[in-house]
Amino acid sequence: MRRDPARTARRALLGLVLVVCLAVAWNLLRPKPQEAPPRPAPSPGAGTTVGNLEFLRFKDDSRKIDVKAREMVKQQGDTMLMRGVDASMPFVNEGRASVLKIQAEECQYQPSIERAAFKGKVVLRTDDGFELATETLKYWGDQQRAFTGDALSFKRGSLSGTATGLEYRPGSGILLRENVKVRIDDPQGGPGDIESQSATGSREERVFSFAGAVKATQGARELRANDLRLDMNAGMDAVERATATGNVDLLTGAGAALPGSTTASGGSKRLRGQRLEAVFRAKGVLQQVTTTEQASLELEPGPQDTPERRRVTGPRLRFEFDEQGALVSLHAPGPASGARGTGAASRLAVLMSEPLDPAKGAPRRVESETFDATLDPATGDPKAAEFKGAVQFSEPGRKAWAGQSSYDDAAGTLVMTGDPRILDEGEGSELKAQTITLGTRTRAVSAHGNVRHSIARRTSGKRPGMFGSEQPTLFLCRDFEYEPKTRTARYQENALVRSGTDEVRAPLITLEEAAPGKRRMTASGGTTSLLHPRSGKETAKPPAPVDARSKEMVYEEAASRVVYKGDVEIRQGDILTKSPEATAFLTKDGNDVERLEAGEPVEVHQGQRRANGDRGVYTPSDETFVLTGEKVVLFDLDRRLVGRILTFESGSDRIRVDGREEERTEAVFKRKEPPRP
């Protein structure tokens, strides 16, 4: 039976209708067209030929489909060839009637299997501005499949792009097979480009995905990943979530503003990981960005910044943005359940800073289980930060540990709590306290509560002096302060310094070090010191300790001496001296007390005896005290003796008194026992 050519041409339009779906699927900025209710089959109208042009029109009560062809040729079997095709047809877009137009040099159609092939400068247009151009476009109705293997281009408003190969199936969406390039013109942020090996889009799932060597750029920003997925909102006019996976690398060029900010910000910034997920508010405003699996953020300095590179790494990094899309916080919340990596290092957040010129600074590092920072929305600079769990700071020669630490940029401080301690390997010291505060800009240190500061002996020093014990010198107090510019440490509230068996106590102890080997220690507010001199003979009984009390005490390491000032009282064994000032001179190696000078004047007590003179010299090696002056007076029970030199022996009843003039007489008295009652 002879086939009706009008019916044949009408079936060919099934291919065009499917291309309409293709156009809508590609255009992700528009919602899915609503399905029109079933309509009665259109009745064929009259066909008119003018010259070599043929017009075919089909219409019903509400729509009109026009197909123009320069020539229609019946081929072998049921195949039909149309040349110079120009067709238009209605479709519904967002509830609004729209028109689709398609042009091609020729169209070959097989009605028995409902397959149509457009060839030669194929152009598809919709009246809302979408346009698709390619050399071939095929429709296989038996498989409900539209595809091309040729290069194609498309555009609609601010969206344009190219690809090689396209395929569309209802329910499966659209596939761009190779060499995908998409451009979105943004008047505010500049044009954005996306490149990938392939891309897919599904209107039913509201998802568009790029796969294989993805590269997305906009201005100074560039994102590279293995894959990129965009989840659209219900209206298909904005991205709700963007997910990049596989070797994710987001680079922001030097001077580029942070998201939500118009202020140029420092040097380049690089965010990397195996997975990056961005969540958007309405109108594409960033709300949150999370990077996982080997996450890292690297910041290069700007021209006006400190010349150091900063880096943040962790199992996860989460960035929070305010309502305007400005970055306001950074979190490293620790590994999620089931996260890769079981080693201790893989569970820690790490912050590092490294000077660009190693000769002008030292690298620094901070580790913790969790990390939370708040940022200035305008500049992106940190305002505050909290480190929790196994906190560790390190730089060459110095390390610190704490259970928790808080950073305040305005105050320029880092407060450490939870059994904090600082180990200075260069100084050979360790500081412990309930709370330790570090000055991030001044490098000052303060501590409060049960302060314990130990300083190891410097074996290279020629005069270790009061710090010469084999054991570390230990400082104990309630409050501690260290000023790095003057290299001054202050120990306050029940301060105690102990070196071996020697110790000093005072309300305030200050330790200054102008240069190596020139330490100066000052104790004030009422001091007590206890020194243990050594005997000159190996078999001799150790000398009694020197117990000194005064208003102030000064130890000078370079001079190897200790100066006591203000109401000085010094006791060794049974000898007590009182004077306004006294000085203890140390041995050449600084390890022992060579002599102690008191005066002027000086008062000596030994049991019931009392003597006054101008100056006194005590020698610990033989435990003798020599009192001198123009008039040395000795009071011994009911006796009084005047001379110029008076010598006491600790623990002995013997006293030697030299004559006033040139006479070398000596009087020796035996101490009398007081009368028994």
Image (cartoon, helix red, strand yellow):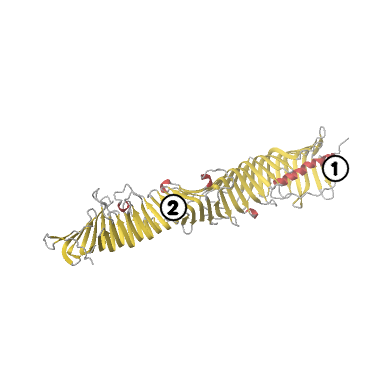
Answer with mark 1 or mark 2, whichever residue precedes in sequence. 1
In the rendered image, the vertical position of residue 377 relative to residue 70, given as above or below:
below
Question: Residue 116 location, x and y as percent?
Answer: 77, 38
Quarter of the figure with residue 451? bottom left
Q: Which residue is mark 1?
A: 47
Q: Residue 257: percent from the left, percent from the top? A: 55, 53
Do the residues under discs 1 and 2 have CB atoms within 8 angstroms? no
Q: Position of residue 268 (x, y in %)?
A: 52, 48
**458 versus 665 height, above or below:** above
Name the residue at the left extreme: 663
From this viewpoint, is residue 285 visible? Answer: yes
The quarter of the rendered structure image containing the N terminus is top right
User: Can residue 136 be seen in this snapshot?
Assistant: no
In which quadrant of the rendered view does residue 161 lie? top right
**Residue at screen point 32% across, 60% down:** 528
Amino acid of disc 1: Gly
* Mark drawn on residue 421: 2
Left or right: residue 571 versus residue 369 is left
Which numbered disc, 1 or 2, marks the residue closer to the eye? 2
Mark 2, Cα crowd under 10 Å, few <14 / some 14-19 / many 20+, is many
Mark 2 secondary-structure assignment: strand
**Residue at the extreme top of the image, as rendered:** 76
Label drawn at residue 339: none
Horizontal side of 91 relative to 578 (left or right) equals right
* Residue closer to the observer: 149 or 341: 341
